[in-house]
Amino acid sequence: MRNIVLFLILSAMTLTAYTQNNKRLYDFTVDGIDGKPFDLSSLKGKKVLVVNVASKCGFTPQYAKLEELYEKYRDRNFVIIGFPANNFLSQEPGTNEEIRTFCTTKYGVSFPMMAKISVKGKDIHPLYSWLTDKKENGVLDASVKWNFQKFMIDEEGRVVDYAAPATDPLDEKIIRWIENR
């Protein structure tokens, strides 16, 4: 009996430690590009592609393909979340309002855009700290190399993979993940 009690206590402690060290996307609230809080738990049950974006980057035309991807799969429990960041050669210098105007007028972006954040360095946003650090997400280490790095989050809110900045948003790797092929 004593061994069973000890086993149960150790199991509970292990589960608690695992849960604390392995947050999910749903544990975060961020600011939308409009300045209002956006609770990521509202995305439960959806696959989420998290992308750090910039308006003055060689990869900026990816906005068009991200929008195409979003339009094609948005009705299949899929969403893209864009996070403007100015971490790479000051390629996102605009205000949130300027970024929103740029995205909607130039690329017709309709997927959710969040407020500008930092995706690396000493001022890294907690969400990106979780996305990039295996100790926090329990799956992988993946420092952000440049604008338009894409993180794939499953329907349970767990990081499952990422795609490099140069990866086309319509790449077969991303499509297979969305379609579960």
Image: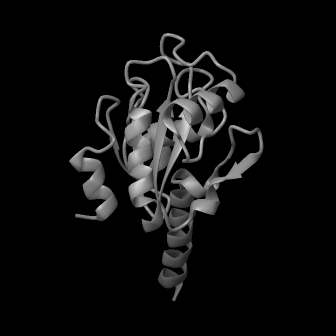
On the image, the x and y values in percent for residue 54 come to: 51, 24
Left or right of residue 69, residue 12 in this image: right
On the image, the x and y values in percent for residue 40 come to: 62, 54
In this view, the residue in front, 147 or 142, is 147
Q: Residue furthest bottom?
A: 1
- Identify which residue is drawn at 56% across, 25% down: 85
In this view, the residue in front, 122 or 68, is 68
- Identify which residue is drawn at 37% across, 40% down: 65
Q: How is the image coloured?
A: one colour
Residue 89 appears in the picture as rendered:
yes
Q: Quadrant of residue 150?
A: top left
- Identify which residue is drawn at 50% across, 63% down: 14
Residue 134 appears in the picture as rendered:
no
Q: Residue furthest front?
A: 105
In the image, is residue 138 above or below residue 167?
below
In this view, the residue in front, 129 or 178, is 178
In the picture, the quarter occupied by the C terminus is: bottom left
Left or right of residue 39, residue 35 in this image: right
On the image, the x and y values in percent for residue 76 come to: 42, 67
